[in-house]
Image: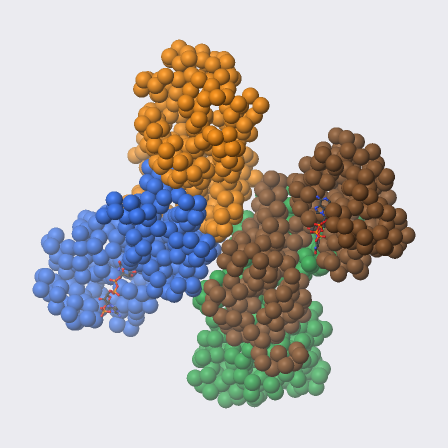
Chain colours: A brown, B green, C blue, D orange
């Protein structure tokens, strides 16, 4: 995700000092006009703001707080983390940074590689007003910027909440589509009715027509990853003292699907678990298949 | 609902024979151009198709199968029930009608009184092809016609499934909004993020902005009614052998809200139950309130 | 169930007039000392109290309220229904009986055929004090009599509540045994720990050692029947306005097991559903199996 | 818990070297015949086996792995942890100990202060055969020893599973007692029926008669603690890939009670949450209260 975002910033006229352990990535960025540093720390030393997009909480922790981490550099008074790490990790790192007079800004993104390339990401920005306001013009080259709160971790909370909403839609739609199919309803008509009325959600407008009714189950996010995001969200709910009965049921369906079909199953395969229970499959009518072609 | 639908049909050029126990309703329809019968049976006797829009399953049963019911008349070979009665009642009445050589067509509607007036209802039509096809042109004056299946009861199933989807959206959105608010997220920003991404559903696009964040809780459907629709849906799931873990959790939230706040609470008041558990309320920031005015 | 109970009453010195549509049953009862009537109505005509043990609500309704039912006879001022019918049916029949000046007493039983033979049933007796008190000495020949309330239907409620408790124990024990087994714990040790402490229930003391860890799954009650009892209980909870989140989850596990393994599976096979999800089976260690032999 | 257990071992003739940061505790143990060390490390240095009973995972970690921890001493080849820490912490510490050639044996207990004094605890012992077998005679002075598995953490798993069983019983009993009470059933009769039949569990035999129907809610374990144990159990289920639908509902009731009544509420106050939802309280009939006195 980092490369396309950095490219957009360069194209918008910002000057960047980049670092990636992968030499190829560095070469690409250099060709695109970036200065290349020999370490994350070196990059941070020479810039007022550091932007990070890293795979896991452990890597984020290492790159910021580790032995050769950003906090050892003089520059980078503001560190913007674009990775998904969960609210607890963001709060923890923000506290460490604050002890050293630095500000962590929390800005997880959604919208995928395509969104990163096209500048159509959703960015969930959280951090103190003074730190955050000057960042907005740059971040708007990456997508829609939503200022969701004023302390680190709130962007992460927003992100796991959004993902829970998304998987809730997928789970309830799977259940209703299986009951409908077993009752002899036409799947395409069901989707049409939902989309025309109060049943509409992103599973009915998007995932079912494109990735589920086709039986391709190729949305592209793994069930393990969605179960993990749900876990992060429900753990936060536990800590915050917010009961989520429906969210809990959604998380359970995700875990159950992961345990039953394996971690690499597509998240849309929730449908297949309900189908197995109900001993029926949701298939388009031949006519609809033709019409859809 | 019956009056505005009948009016639209008259305006479209159809000739109607109407009956309603309420004399005032009859007078209105007469003024609009309808012939008035002195009973439902008399109305049915003179017409090839009977259209019904009645409050409860018991009334529908009485008007069709009762002592002075439609089945006692010669006409009305096709009976179109536009009421919401649940799949079991529709199947049961269809079977009784079939014994007398009559066809029940099942066509529950959604879209409210406004939809009925404006011809923007969603109509979930189910019944044998031969009976249903000739009805479509007339029904299209009432709204969007979705042919969801070919036997009576399937329209009802479609309707309770759609309503379960709608209340699922409301429940999960209530849970995530409360966790967000307790985490200090700005409610309007949360809704904006959901609507820009995969969290979008009809609670985020419609009910929360208009009826919940305003704290008016005035969507207009009672929690008792939505709990009843969820019950009809989950009972059908039980009969059909389709487990619905998330649907079950949704139904539970509806029942719990009904038991806790009373049957007349607005269905959007689910939020208030989660707020009470979490001891926090979801309030717009003053600035957002101004901006929204 | 009726035959062994009637036999115990005869042996205790009561005189009975019996009827059963099955001639063989009548012959057996005659041999045991009963007078045989040619119909239920005839039997009721000549006795102050009628006792019924019938398979389904519909049969109970027919035998009491039907064309040739007990209410048509002069005798049987008090009707004791020992069948399991659910609280709503009992209340409904009691109301019909009351209109005719008769009292329905509600007395479902538990303890199986063996309990019926040995006089060790549990009898859940509900009805007005005046009607119920004189019955107790006779009923005590059948087992333990518990007076649970003073109006018809309360015995039924007691019975479905007890069964929900029993299946809840079975479901949670299945879940913990599977997690234990997958964690490498010894199943017999687990049961021993539960039984020595606060984890003890009738699944750990009885069903698991005798019917589940043996892999025989031969407790003898079908999953369809236990799912139906849970449905009766949860429907009553819905009507009474009592949320039951854990009871709802138990019912869901029962339905899911029924839908997945078929209605005739033994109720103890809930374990097998959890095993399939978790891809592990709960097996005794060889040594424990020997020790247990 | 440590003091009464150590006292029993001294009384049984074992020689102990004790350490506790609280000087008073040390004095008591000295009076009882123990040698007192000036630190945990010093105590461990002079003994082949170390026994620990400490409040939280963090303290256990510090005392074993910390700067002045047991692993720094020469003795204590075998470390027996009697604390409740959860399976993950036990596995983690066992791994650290193993790197230093030491064996962690996992032996959480249940039965409370009274059990510790009377030697009637349940001890859930897990660890390699060779380390564990020689410990059994000593541990049997403390209560019933159950060898549940052969690697560290399994004792903890056993303990959180047992506690989940216990709270499941409490939750379902709360739900059924409220529905029974709202249906007019006599609470004492209900408990009697449950205890005579398949509904029996440790809430019906113990907690309800002694701590709940008295309205004292004085069982003595906080809802926060039981919610934490349930969390540990469900997190282990998530890691191990074992879906627990009923366990999940139980955990949810515990969290909800904690969030609603506060963390210090007695775990038996789950009943009060269900009562509030249902707007009814479970009270003994006056006669039963007298009879019970
Ligand atoms: N992919 C997606 O669709 C979305 C991703 N996200 C989030 O964005 C973040 C980045 O995702 P994505 O780009 O897919 O992740 P990648 O796995 O591609 O990792 C991003 C970059 O981090 C580099 N990196 C790894 N370890 C270190 C280290 N120790 N020091 C410095 N750099 C390191 C990687 O180098 P190398 O290539 O050498 O490993 C890689 O170039 C994640 O937090 C993800 O959750 C959010 C929304 C959508
Ligand atoms: N209202 C809404 O927003 C929606 C309603 N529906 C469904 O549409 C159906 C009709 O709803 P609605 O119009 O609100 O209901 P109403 O309660 O207004 O009843 C409809 C009409 O039926 C008449 N009626 C009552 N009993 C009898 C009888 N025994 N014989 C003949 N006519 C009788 C009523 O007369 P009288 O006025 O004298 O009682 C009334 O005019 C219901 O099934 C409802 O669930 C579906 C979607 C939305
Ligand atoms: N079996 C068990 O372990 C337990 C059963 N119960 C309850 O006890 C009740 C009786 O159970 P069970 O004895 O197993 O049931 P059965 O199916 O054996 O039925 C009992 C008797 O009723 C007779 N019967 C059926 N229809 C009629 C009718 N229309 N008029 C008169 N008699 C009729 C049957 O005759 P025929 O043989 O000709 O059909 C049979 O002899 C049920 O409600 C059950 O739920 C409760 C606890 C345990």
Q: Is residue B105 above or below residue C193?
A: below
Q: Residue furthest right?
A: A13
- Tell me: C174 left or right of B223: left
Nearest to the observer: residue D156 or residue A170? D156
- Tell me: C85 left or right of A212: left
> In the picture, which quadrant includes the C terminus of chain A?
bottom right
Instruction: Please tell me which residue is depicted at 77% across the width and 30% down the height of the picture.
Output: A100
> In the picture, which quadrant includes the N terminus of chain A?
bottom right
Q: Position of residue A71 (x, y in %)?
A: 76, 34
Nearest to the observer: residue D225 or residue C81? D225
Q: Position of residue D184 (x, y in %)?
A: 39, 48
Q: Position of residue B207 (x, y in %)?
A: 69, 57
Task: Say whether residue C241 is visible.
Answer: yes
Instruction: Please tell me which residue is depicted at 61% across the width and 57% down the height of the picture.
Output: A222
Question: Could you say which quadrant of the image residue A191 lies in?
Answer: bottom right
Q: Is residue D161 above or below residue C13?
A: above
Nearest to the observer: residue B228 or residue B155? B155
Instruction: Please tell me which residue is depicted at 83% across the width and 46% down the height of the picture.
Output: A36
Nearest to the observer: residue A183 or residue D211? A183
Q: Position of residue C268 (x, y in %)?
A: 35, 55
Task: Say whether residue B82 is visible.
Answer: no
- Tell me: C290 left or right of D41: left
Q: How many marks?
A: 0
Instruction: Please tell me which residue is depicted at 52% across the width and 59% down the height of the picture.
Output: A261
């Amino acid at each position: 995700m980092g490369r396309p975002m950095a490219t957009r910033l360069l194209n918008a006229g910002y000057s960047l000092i980049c670092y990636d352990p992968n030499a190829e990535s560095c070469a690409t960025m250099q060709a695109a006009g970036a200065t290349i540093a020999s370490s994350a720390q070196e990059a941070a030393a020479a810039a007022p703001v550091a932007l990070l997009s890293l795979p896991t909480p452990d890597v984020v922790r290492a790159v910021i707080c580790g032995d050769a981490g950003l906090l050892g550099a003089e520059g980078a008074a503001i560190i913007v983390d674009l990775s998904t790490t969960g609210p607890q990790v963001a709060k923890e790192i923000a506290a460490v940074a604050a002890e050293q007079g630095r500000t962590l800004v929390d800005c997880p993104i959604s919208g995928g590689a395509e969104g990163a390339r096209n500048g159509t990401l959703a960015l969930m920005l959280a951090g103190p007003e003074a730190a955050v306001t000057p960042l907005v013009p740059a971040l708007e080259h990456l997508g829609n910027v939503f200022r969701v709160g004023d302390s680190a971790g709130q962007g992460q909370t927003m992100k796991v909440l959004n993902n829970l909403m998304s998987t809730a839609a997928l789970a309830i739609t799977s259940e209703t589509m299986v009951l409908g199919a077993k009752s002899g309803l036409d799947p395409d008509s069901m989707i049409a009715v939902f989309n025309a009325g109060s049943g509409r959600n992103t599973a009915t407008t998007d995932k079912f027509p494109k990735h589920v009714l086709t039986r391709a189950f190729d949305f592209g996010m793994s069930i393990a990853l969605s179960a993990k995001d749900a876990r992060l969200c429900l753990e936060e709910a536990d800590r915050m003292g917010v009961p989520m009965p429906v969210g809990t049921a959604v998380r359970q369906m995700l875990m159950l699907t992961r345990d039953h079909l394996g971690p690499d199953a597509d998240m849309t395969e929730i449908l297949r678990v309900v189908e197995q229970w109900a001993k029926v499959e949701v298939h388009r009518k031949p006519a609809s298949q033709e019409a859809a072609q």
